[in-house]
Amino acid sequence: MVNKSLELGYFPRVYKVAAVKVIPKPGKDDYARLKSYRPIGLLPVLGKTVERMLVGRLQWHLMPKLQATQYGFTPQRGMKDALYDLMTYIYKELNLKKIVLMVSLDVESAFDNAWWPHIENPAARL
């Protein structure tokens, strides 16, 4: 059934409908604020199965083509590996008496506040 779904390029709507449960975050002072809660979306098992099979197939085709510095969406590689490689690079450059400059940016709730039409269709006008 999953193979046929992938073959046809059809993902049934029922697989996309999540049961959302709202869980209060522990230790919050004011539970009248929305940020004091964490929504959890529970998706159907069949939908998760199709997703996992699709991701596996994509990884099989794409993994040989990825750069060695690709950390996100890569099996057995993550933030700790990226930080380790970054620190190794910094120490190597400092030992060579070079200047190292790093700029990092983290925008709180950036994805939540993004303009969805542009994410869905990058050609959409801003």
Image: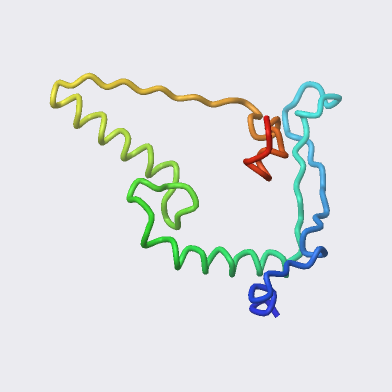
View extreme (left): residue: 96
What residue is drawn where x is 68% and y is 45%?
Answer: 120
Depth check, front residue: 79 or 27? 79
* 93 over 7 or under it: above or below: above
Position of residue 60 in the picture relative to residue 97 (left or right):
right
Report the quarter where the C terminus lies. Answer: top right
What colouring method underlies this structural image?
rainbow
The percent position of residue 118, horizontal first and vertical second, equals 67, 38
Q: Choose top left, top right, bottom left or bottom right for residue 82.
A: top left
The percent position of residue 38, horizontal first and vertical second, equals 75, 38
The percent position of residue 116, horizontal first and vertical second, equals 71, 38
Position of residue 88 in the picture relative to residue 42 (left or right):
left
Q: Choose top left, top right, bottom left or bottom right for residue 123.
A: top right
Report the quarter where the N terminus lies. Answer: bottom right
What residue is drawn where x is 79% and y is 41%?
Answer: 23
* 85 over 74 or under it: above or below: above
The percent position of residue 5, horizontal first and vertical second, equals 69, 74
* 4 over 19 or under it: above or below: below
What residue is drawn where x is 37% and y is 37%?
Answer: 83
What residue is drawn where x is 66% and y is 69%?
Answer: 49
Position of residue 55 in the picture relative to residue 9 (left or right):
left
